[in-house]
Every structure is written in structure tokens, then in C-alpha cells.
Image (cartoon, grey):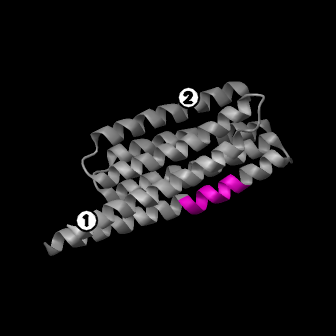
Amino acid sequence: MIYIMNALLIIGGVTALVGTLGCFKFKDFLSRTHAASIVETFSTLLIISALIIHSGFSLFSLKLILILIFLYVTGSTAIHALTQAFLKHQDHKEKK
Amino acid sequence: MSDINILIILMVSLAMVISIFRFITAKEIFTRILSVNLIGTKIVLLILLVGTVSIEKDFTDIAMVYALINFISTIVVLKYYEDKEVSK
């Protein structure tokens, strides 16, 4: 069990680093949101599920599951709203 | 657990430093909002990891409140800039 946990933690940390570096690498803003949402969803899923495995069946893990669901819903929604605002901004620029 | 946990804490902190550089070198406002959102998500992860290493386990409530504030602040800042742009 501890090997699974360590593997999840390491893959989660590497994913967080790679997604953040992707924000530097991509030139376009819409590509950057793709790299950022990898950190927002995949890395969060891996690290929090490793902590759930570590803490076992308790109130702590219930709170962790709640945080995971909450981060999934709000992170995706925030990046979606950001993309919509960017598209509106581009439309507004073209009209001028 | 605790050795590898500290390694992951260092990795997430390094990613946060890279996000701060992204914030400084960004040219448009949307990339800045994106990097602030990224920093907030990583702070939530960092709070949870530190709470697992230490003996105290009351950090989860703080992480939940931080995630809520992060989401609301992103939406409010976006709405502010959108209104400013439309009124121009």
C-alpha cells in the first residue's frame, strides 16, 4: 500500500511541475489554460488520493474527499469563465 | 511517508515559485489571473501536505475555506475587468 501512495505522490508532484512549466512554454493563451487545468485537476486528484490512502477510514479522509470534489467543480468552472472572458475580449477587440 | 512528503512539498513550492515568475513576466491580464488561480490551487495542496506531516490535523478546514475564497476571487476579478472593458 505504501508503494502505491509514494507513486501517487511522486506522479502528482511531477505533474504539478510539468503543468506549471507548460504555462511558460506555450505562446497562446488558450493553450496555457490547457496546461493550467492539468495542474488543477490531475495533480490534485493524485495528491489528495494519496493522502486519503495514508489517513485511512476517518473523518480526515471524508473532509479530503469533500475538498477533492469541491476543487474539481470550482477549478474547471474558473478556467472556463476565464476562457469565456478571453473570447469576449477578442470579439470586442475585433469590432473596434 | 514523511521523507517523500517533504520532497513533494519542495516540488509544489518550486512550482509555486515558477507560477510567481509567470505572474511577473505576463503581458496580458488573463495570464495573470490564470497564474493567481494556479498559485491558489497549489496553496491548498501545500496546506494539506503540511497538515499530514505535522501532528495537528485541523488544517483541512482551512484548506476548504482557502479553496472557496480562491474560486470567488477569480470570478469577482474577472467580472470587474469585464465590466470595465464593456464600459470603455
- Chain ID for label 2? B
Per the rendered image, the range of residues in magenta is: A66-74
Q: Residue at x 43, y 43 (%)?
A: A20
- Chain ID for label 1? B
Q: Position of residue A85 (x, y in %)?
A: 35, 66
Q: Which residue is drawn at 39% across and 46% down?
A: A22
Q: Mark 2 points at which residue?
A: B10
Q: Where is residue B28 in the image (x, y as percent from the top left)?
A: 26, 52
- Position of A9 relative to A28 (above/below): above
> Which of these two is toward me, B15 or B54?
B54
Q: Which residue lies furthest to the bottom in this view?
A: A95
Q: Give the secondary structure at mark 1.
A: helix
Location of the C terminus of chain B (image quadrant) = bottom left
- Position of B81 relative to B43 (above/below): below
Instruction: Identify the mark at residue B85; answer none if there is no mark.
Output: 1
Q: Which amino acid does label 2 sit on?
A: Leu
Q: Where is residue A39 in the image (x, y as percent from the top left)?
A: 51, 49
> Which of these two is toward me, B76 or B1?
B76
Q: Label 2 crowding class (10 Å Cα cut-off): few <14, some 14-19, many 20+? A: some
